[in-house]
Structure formats: C-alpha cells, structure tokens
Amino acid sequence: MTQVHQDGGPVRTRPSSNGKWAFAVLALALGCGDASAPAFPPFIGSGGTSGTGGMGGIGIGGTSGTGGTSGSGGTHNTGGNGGTGGGSGGTAGTGGSLGLCATSALCHTCPTQNQNLCETDGDCFTGYVCVPSGCETHQGAPISQCQPSRGGSCSSVAECPNSTDYVCAPVGAGPTHCLRVTPGCTGPTESYDCPLGFSCEVGACVDRRVPCESYLDCPKNHVCKTGSSSSFCARVYQTCHQDVDCAGLGSFCENVDNDNLATEECVGQLDATGNPCVNGACASSSAPVCEAGVSGTTAACGQYGLCLTDNDCDTGFSCVGLWQDGRKECVRAGGSCDQVTDCPPQQVCAAPRAGGPPSCQAGSAL
C-alpha cells in the first residue's frame, strides 16, 4: 500500500441512511474478489535440487528437481519421484503437512484458496481492499485476503471527510460507505483509510495487530477479534457514522468525549441502562470516563477512556493521544510510551489489561 497525506478534516454529520453493513474483520475471510482470482504464487513449492518437495507449499513432489539422496518422499508428497540424483525426494517433503503457511501467534489457521486470497486491491470487489491476513508462506511471503474498507456509512459524499479523496459508494453489493479513492492515509482519518488494526504513520498504514486468544491478551479499550485465519486486539474507539458501523466494537456510535468537532466513535452500552456510555454520564471523580467492557458491546464509567484534557481524568492520570486520529485517552502517568509509533510493528502503546501506565503491548506474542 503506497500512502500519501491529504488535508481535509472529517465532516461529522449523522447520515440519514439506514443501510446496514455488518462489517466483520473478525473474518478476514469475508467474501470478495473473483472466485477465479489467481492463486498466490508462493503457495506451491516444487522440489529443487535437494529434493525438499516444496517446504512452503502443499507438498507436491518436485517434477523438475534432481531428487534427494536421503530416501522416500514425505507423507504428503503426491508426486515425489526424484530426478537423476539417485533416489526419490528427501524427508523434507513432509513440510506440506503444515498447509499453505507457517502458523504464528497472529496466524492461527492457514487460509485456503477459497477464502478470498488476493495480491492487489484489483482482485477484490469494489469497496474491499487487499490486506495481509497475518499469515505468511514458509518462505516469508505475506498471504493477503480481501476485506471491506473501514469508512463509515453515508448517504452522500458530504458525510465523508472530503470530496477529493473519498466517494460515497457501495461496499461490494452492500450499503454505501465513505471509500478512499486516492492513495494514502492521514492520521485524523485513519479509521477510514486503514484496515482495522492498522495505524496511519507517515502516510502509510502500518500493521498494529496485536495477537490474542481471548480478551485477556488485549490491553484496555481493546477487544479480541477472532476470524478464520487470525485473531487480534482491535481498538474499540473507531470513527463511525451510524450504530451499524460498530459491529463487534460497540452497540452505539456516539460522541463519547463531547469534543467540539462532534466526531463520533464506537462505544458500548453503559452498564444495563440500554443507553450508550458517554463521559457526561460519568459523575464520579474516581471513575470520570467511559471504559470499554470485555466484549466491546458493554462499557462502564472508569479511569481509562476518552478525554479532552487532563482535567477529564482521575488524579494520577494524564490525557494522552495514543493513536494518530487525534483522540486522547486517560492513562496512568509515567508510561514507557506516549503513542503507537513508539512501539515496534504488531504492538500498540496502551494501558495493560490489569491497568497501569501505557507500555508497548504485544498480546499473546509475549
């Protein structure tokens, strides 16, 4: 993804559209692209001169290699007869038993050919983007899949950040959303420009997906999004236009911190009130801001949450802009990082799940 900056601040008016869009990054395997799209080239490895039988592929025998000298082919070799080198493929051919890729903390299941694999955005439906799934081939090449763009619902481009970089168009065969049509991203609009779990840094969307097995692996105000190939911690406070934009991140789309730009973000229900959690509903000085609950669909007044100034936070807490979109959160003072760019890729700067000052969080990769 080649990225550049754009100017244009976000327009924050509630759209009249009632279209539903069940955005679900929890399945980087959502439908997209042509079913006949070309397979990812590195998936099938052919045996080389050492008769390894394609360690990174699906284990078919090398038809052009010269065969190893160490014995019969691996159990998943379907061809496997070696060349003139004096024997059939070596035992390394069993690499095919691992599937298309090497699993990792982020990649728990290798995607298959019918799970929307892609190489570029052109392999995907309109409104979808080609994003690294978190899985890689055994040779280290990323395996990408199509997923919906993140822009909020809209009925016209006037509800998008600007009319130069965005259009209000359908996502696949679904409702209309604000879609970026020019290369690049900016911090204030990273929720439109970058996939969930990515941060806009120096004009490029950088992978900040923190692997998880459950919410216990995620920092404050993050939830564990589990899909068919990968599971990662997703920040709850994403820009939205309607409640339906917040699937899995909250029940409501509200101006939680009551900022002057009237920007809205996903937030959960305040306890069992049936109402969204907004800071104005938190009256206690020891719990002055909305803090995301375990599932992302609930919230409660607490110490960790969106803020505008230090005065919005409890004693001993500071109001810090951890991400690039201009939003700030109350975190305990004295952290080892101040923003996401202080941390390596696939880590985030956030308060630990159990509380405390912000630090670089790596989730279940620890």
Image: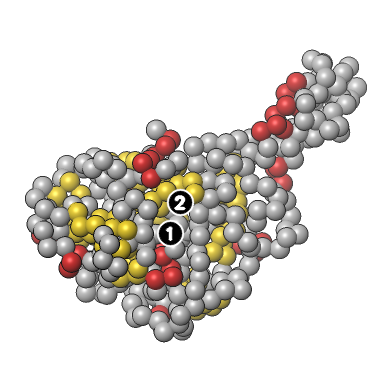
Check disc 1: other Cα within 10 Å, few if <14, some if 14-19, many if 20+: many
Check disc 2: other Cα within 10 Å, few if <14, some if 14-19, many if 20+: many
Quarter assignment of residue 135? top right
Q: Looking at the image, which is closer to me, 225 or 131?
A: 225
- Could you tell me which residue is drawn at 80 percent across and 30 percent down? 77
Name the kind of residue labelled 2 in the image: Lys
Disc on res. 92? none
- Left or right of residue 317: residue 20: right
Label 2 sits on residue:
225
Label 1 sits on residue:
248
Residue 251 at x, y percent in the picture: 37, 65
Residue 98 at x, y percent in the picture: 66, 33
Q: Looking at the image, which is closer to me, 358 or 200?
A: 358
Q: Are marks 2 and 1 in contact (CB under 8 Å)?
A: yes
Residue 228 at x, y percent in the picture: 57, 49
- Could you tell me which residue is drawn at 44 percent across and 70 percent down? 244
